[in-house]
Image (spheres, rainbow, N blue to C red):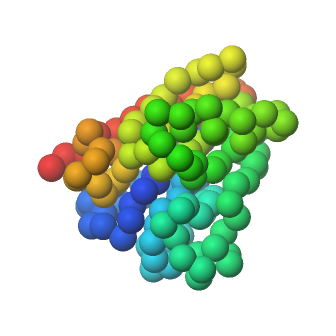
Amino acid sequence: MKIGVVADTHSLEISEQLLNDLEGADLIIHAGDFCTLEELKMFRRIAEVQAVYGNMDGAELRRILPRRQVFEAEGVAIGVVHGAGAPEGLLDIVQAEFKNDKVNAVVFGHSHQPFNQVINKVLYFNPGSAGDRAFAPYRSYGILEIHSGKISGKIVKLKG
């Protein structure tokens, strides 16, 4: 199973590379900060979307999206949350958010910093920001792949 992962798109220009790359995805996870409902609808035209709202998302998105969620894909439990606070303490906040859940992976956003690391047998994955050119080291998204009950991730740097 191939899962496209995006976060912190902030209603900024979505690259054609990202949209084309997501075309083959079985699922898209968005870890918050869409900023407009139209953006969510755009991703839903490509594939099924599992998403949470972020701190920059308004009432319209907060009414239809959860703050956090845990779902299963091909036997793998995936937690999703946007995150909060300073980038330096974000991983601790995200880990605490799912301390009572049995998850194999946690997808988060907020910092605009790509992160792909297994800690205590849990994959923590932040795809970075697909739209930010100011605070992110580069524009990026992620791919999660599930094979035989195991999940792995990679960060994809967008061109331009």
Residue drawn at x 58%, y 42% as measured from the top left: 107
Residue at 56% across / 49% down in the picture? 84
Q: Is 119 placed left or right of 36 in the picture? A: right
**Residue 39 position within the rendered picture, expressed as x and y whole percent measured from the top left:** 44, 73
Q: Quick check: can you spot residue 46?
A: no
* Residue sitting nearer the eye, 101 or 155: 101
Q: Is residue 13 above or below residue 24?
A: below
Would you place residue 103 above or below residue 85 in this image? Answer: above
What is the tally of numbered marks visible in this picture? 0
Q: Quadrant of residue 118?
A: top right
Residue 15 percent location from the top left of the image: 26, 60
Residue 105 x/y as whole percent: 66, 34
Q: Nearer the viewer, residue 103 or 143?
A: 103
Tell me the residue at 29%/55% (across/down).
Answer: 132
| 90 with respect to 81 (left or right) | left
Viewport quadrant of the N terminus: top right
Quadrant housing residue 93: top right
Is 64 located above or below residue 117 in the figure?
below
Above or below, 92 relative to 61: above
Quadrant of the rendered image containing residue 102: top right
Identified at 45% across, 39% down, the residue is: 87
The residue positioned farthest toward the top in the image shown: 120
Q: Nearer the viewer, residue 93 or 81?
A: 93
Give left or right: position of 46 versus 67: left
Measured as percent of width and height from the top left, residue 106 is found at: 64, 38
Residue 7 makes an appearance in the image? yes
